[in-house]
């Protein structure tokens, strides 16, 4: 059973702060989010990384910018580095008009890393255009084969443990139509070096209305990866065993008429799998907007693809896109999310505010 212990609003430097991630590394808790004036890609935003050693006092550790609309950062840690990967809409330059285009843009996944959490290197483009790397996990039992970097340089070498990482992206439109159509599986030697490995959801074999996106990978066991993905019709649960080429999918149960946007997954030993995200009541609408929308944590049923025991956090409006991490020192689950429930955002002509929140949860036996 999850019990909410406390909630804190994180001091942020901008009006609309959203799309969060969280990790712990070298004695600090790090959160990352996008800073902008609104949810939409126009005006552009950039990535803010803050950190705290006590969950009380926060400092800005980094600001990452590519010149486009940088959004949805995901923090990743290894023993010696901290990484973040994010998506960025970069407008085309219209040479005829002598200005940036208002209607066409490229979507790239970017990544950067640091060895101390404050000095970050340059942003690297990852994967391929219009393929948004949304999540990646480390392989604790890599299979022996020539490393990706060795093969990329055309060299031969003794088999080495590689790859070390697996990632999932969703593929979007063509630069003019922002429409999701497939999921792609990647493998890599690091969170910044990837090769395309498999198609997780083939658009030619599914309904064109599915629009799969925001896939969250997690380890079900040592040889099985699970994935929870958003679609515009329902939430999907997928699985694949090594070498993770063939994926099977079915609807995620236990949600009723709701769906999960931007799922975040945390696997806890002796507890199970926690899933957090935006609970989106697709079946209850008012005009073109959902009637209810909040940030919720569920437990994934170990026996079947179904979530149970929802815990709804204070949130409303444009909200959620959470991050989860286990705080071993405090024996707590930390969750970070954004929401509009604290400030009035209905004033005509004013930008819509959104704030960042940190929740601390204890885990007790059912």
Image (cartoon, rainbow, N blue to C red):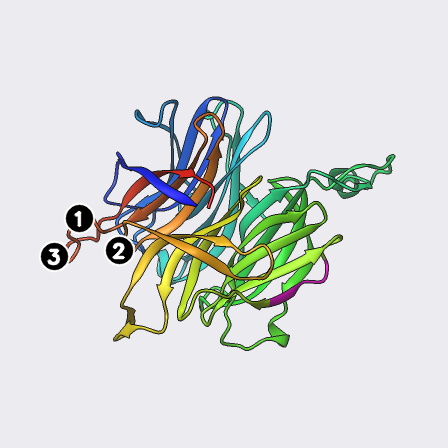
Q: Secondary structure at mark 3?
A: loop
Residue placed farthest to the front in the image? 366
Q: Which residues are magenta?
A: 245-249
List the residue tagged with mark 2.
316
Distance, label 1 to label 3, CA atoms, is 11 Å
Q: Are marks 1 and 3 in contact (CB under 8 Å)?
A: no
Number of numbered callouts drawn: 3
Q: Secondary structure at mark 1?
A: loop
Would residue 193 appear left or right of 25 to someone viewing this image? Answer: right
Mark 3, Cα crowd under 10 Å, few <14 / some 14-19 / many 20+, is: few
The answer to whether residue 46 of the structure is visible from this angle is no
Distance, label 2 to label 1, CA atoms, is 10 Å
Pick whichever of labels 2 and 1 is earlier in the sequence: 2
Q: Are marks 2 and 1 in contact (CB under 8 Å)?
A: no
Distance, label 3 to label 2, CA atoms, is 16 Å
Would residue 291 appear left or right of 263 to someone viewing this image? Answer: left
List the residue tagged with mark 1.
343
Which sits in the foreground, 214 or 337?
Answer: 337
- Residue at 46% over, 22% down: 27
- Residue at 61% over, 61% down: 238
Q: Quadrant of the N terminus?
A: top left
Q: Secondary structure at mark 2?
A: loop
Mark 3 or 2, closer to the camera: 2
Q: Image quadrant of residue 318?
A: bottom left
Pick whichever of labels 3 and 2 is earlier in the sequence: 2
Residue 254 position within the rendered picture, expressed as x and y whole percent measured from the top left? 47, 64
Mark 2, Cα crowd under 10 Å, few <14 / some 14-19 / many 20+, is: some
List the residue tagged with mark 3.
347
- The answer to if 102 sits in the magenta stretch is no
């Amino acid at each position: 059973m999850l019990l909410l212990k406390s909630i804190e609003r994180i001091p942020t430097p901008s009006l609309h702060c959203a799309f969060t991630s969280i990790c712990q590394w070298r004695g600090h808790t790090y959160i990352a989010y996008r800073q902008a004036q609104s949810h939409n890609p126009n005006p552009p935003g950039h990535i803010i990384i803050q950190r705290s050693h006590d969950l009380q006092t926060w400092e800005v550790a980094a600001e990452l910018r590519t010149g486009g609309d940088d959004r949805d950062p995901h923090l990743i840690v290894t023993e010696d580095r901290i990484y973040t990967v994010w998506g960025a809409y970069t407008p085309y330059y219209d040479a005829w008009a002598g200005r940036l285009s208002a209607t066409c843009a490229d979507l790239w996944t970017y990544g950067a890393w640091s060895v101390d959490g404050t000095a970050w290197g340059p942003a690297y483009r990852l994967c391929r255009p219009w393929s948004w790397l949304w999540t990646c996990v480390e392989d604790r039992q890599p299979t022996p084969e020539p490393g990706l970097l060795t093969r990329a340089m055309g060299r031969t070498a003794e088999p080495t443990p590689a790859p070390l990482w697996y990632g999932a992206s969703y593929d979007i439109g063509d630069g003019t139509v922002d429409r999701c159509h497939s999921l792609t599986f990647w493998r890599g030697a690091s969170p910044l070096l990837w090769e395309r490995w498999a198609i997780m959801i083939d658009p030619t074999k599914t309904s064109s209305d599915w629009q799969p996106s925001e896939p969250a990978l997690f380890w079900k066991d040592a040889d099985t990866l699970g994935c929870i993905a958003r679609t515009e019709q329902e939430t999907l649960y997928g699985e694949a065993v090594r070498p993770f080429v063939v994926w099977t999918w079915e609807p995620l149960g236990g949600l009723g008429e709701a769906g999960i946007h931007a799922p975040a997954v945390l696997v806890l030993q002796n507890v199970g799998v926690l899933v957090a995200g935006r609970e989106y009541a697709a079946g209850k609408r008012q005009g073109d907007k959902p009637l209810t929308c909040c940030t919720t944590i569920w437990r994934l049923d170990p026996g079947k693809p179904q979530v149970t025991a929802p815990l709804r956090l204070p949130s409303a409006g444009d909200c959620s896109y959470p991050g989860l991490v286990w705080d071993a020192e405090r024996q707590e689950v930390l969750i970070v999310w954004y929401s509009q429930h604290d400030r009035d955002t209905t004033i005509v002509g004013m930008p819509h505010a959104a704030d960042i929140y940190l929740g601390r949860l204890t885990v007790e036996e059912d």
